[in-house]
Amino acid sequence: MLTLIKNARIYAPRDLGNCDLLICNNKIARIDSHLMDGSIFKRDDPLQRSDVQTHISPLNGLALETIDAAGMIVTPGFVDTLVHITGGGGEGGYLTRTPELNVEEAINSGVTTVIGALGTDANTRSLRELFGKTKSLNAQGISCFMYTGSYEVPIRTLTTSIKDDIIFVDPIIGVGEVAIADHRGSQPTAPELARIAAEARVAGMISGKRGVVLIHVGEGKECLSLLHSVIDTTEVSAQHFYATHINRSEALIKAGVRFAKLGGGIDFTASTTDTLVKLGEIRASKALAMALRLGAPSDRLTMSSDAQGSLPHFDSNGKLDGLEVGRIDSLAYELKLAIQHEGLDIPVALAAVTRNPADITGLYHKGRISVGADADINLLNAETLAVVSVMAKGKWLKRDNVIHTSSLFCRAAP
Ligand code: ZN
């Protein structure tokens, strides 16, 4: 199957201008201006639908679908490097457990690659369940990977070791979220963290993965000091770490920028609440703009949704009085705010949800529009930046605002 997307403004995330894009099966095959004009193939038997500008014509026995994407911008599918795909929460008792990710929510908001993680709870939730959900999301059409471990140290693994998990279990691309500066974490020491990063790195070298360690940074006053003591006292360098929730406060953003300048990846959490913002959290889009102003290298900056994680509200006595669930559509929302409210250039803002998270986690075939990359593509309305169509692994999962999934389920009649 060939798909030709014509007349769109392409952001790869670099601005490629108005180009045509040819997709062959699940890969991007060519990017060029005026690619394969109508004279090259016959349109004598178009299976034309009136609602979309689509033609299917024979081309040496191959079906060619042509899409006129004038008025749209084409971007890579979004890469979300932290999603609690099996649900999270539970820190306020069983009533506060959050539900697992529904693939349609990811598709609807243009997220075509997800990395799943456990969180605080690796007792009633497990890596086996995470593995199953990872496989399920892949079968449903998006690309899903996972981290081994949880907040806990020593790291819980699926096999018997971090190395075996990364080397032998395909969807496992690293370790995470390991909690630091958080009362819910295991209070790891620098040598423990160095050992985790070293094992992940060597496993990555052997298996051709990056073996990154995703660090959950809590509200604790020690900020990123533990990461600095690892990189100052061992052979482990900053680039093996990817620190998330860096938009908790201005002070943490400044610490994050220092870490990014040393080569570490830093991530801003898109899911938030008004209460958290009033308490000092900075919106991910604003944090991104701030980090750039402070001179952080732009390729080290990302946004992720932390979807299905719990966002608790506490009353003035510190008692839990409500809970919201992180949303995967927060990623597209913060991208839009970064461009329209913070005034960032589209390529810079877009890179934070496409190429940068893909590169930091070693998914080099994701998050970019380039020849040979996976055909994960979003068509956005050029004015509103709304996600209109989504292609993942060469298949349309959302087309002109209508979602198409391969889910086998339908509700039984009552
Ligand atoms: Zn976290």
Image: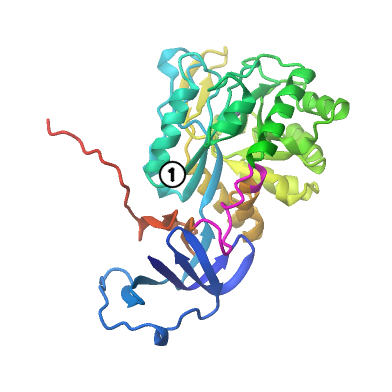
Residue 254 seen in the current view: no
Colour option used: rainbow
Q: Is residue 121 left or right of residue 356?
A: left
Q: Which quarter of the rendered image does ligand 1 occupy? A: top right
Residue found 43% across the figure and 20% down from its top: 97
x 32%, y 48%: residue? 405
Residue beneath the point at 77% across and 21% down: 222
313 or 146: nearer the viewer: 146
Q: Quadrant of the N terminus?
A: bottom left
Q: Which residues are magenta?
A: 359-374
Residue at far right of view: 233
360 is within the stretch colored magenta: yes
Q: Is residue 254 magenta?
A: no
Residue 214 x/y as whole percent: 65, 32
126 over 70 or under it: above or below: above
- Give the dominant element type of the magenta stretch: helix, strand or loop: loop
For the C terminus, the image quarter is: top left
Element under disc 1:
helix
Where 312 sits versus 24, above or below? above
Residue 315 locus on image (x, y percent): 53, 17
The reply, left or right, for residue 381 in relation to residue 363 is: left
Which of the 4 image quadrants contains residue 162? top right
Mark 1 is on which residue type? Answer: Ala
Q: Is residue 204 visible?
A: yes
Q: Residues within 10 Å of mark 1 (few under 14, many from 20)?
A: many
Q: Quadrant of residue 390?
A: bottom left
- For disc 1, the marked residue is 106
Q: Residue at x 55, y 58 (%)?
A: 373
Q: Which sits in the foreground, 172 or 11?
A: 172
- Determine whether 41 is above or below 268 in the image: below
Q: Where does the image place residue 157, in percent across and percent down from the top left? A: 57, 21
- The residue at label 1 has a CB less than 8 Å from ligand 1: no
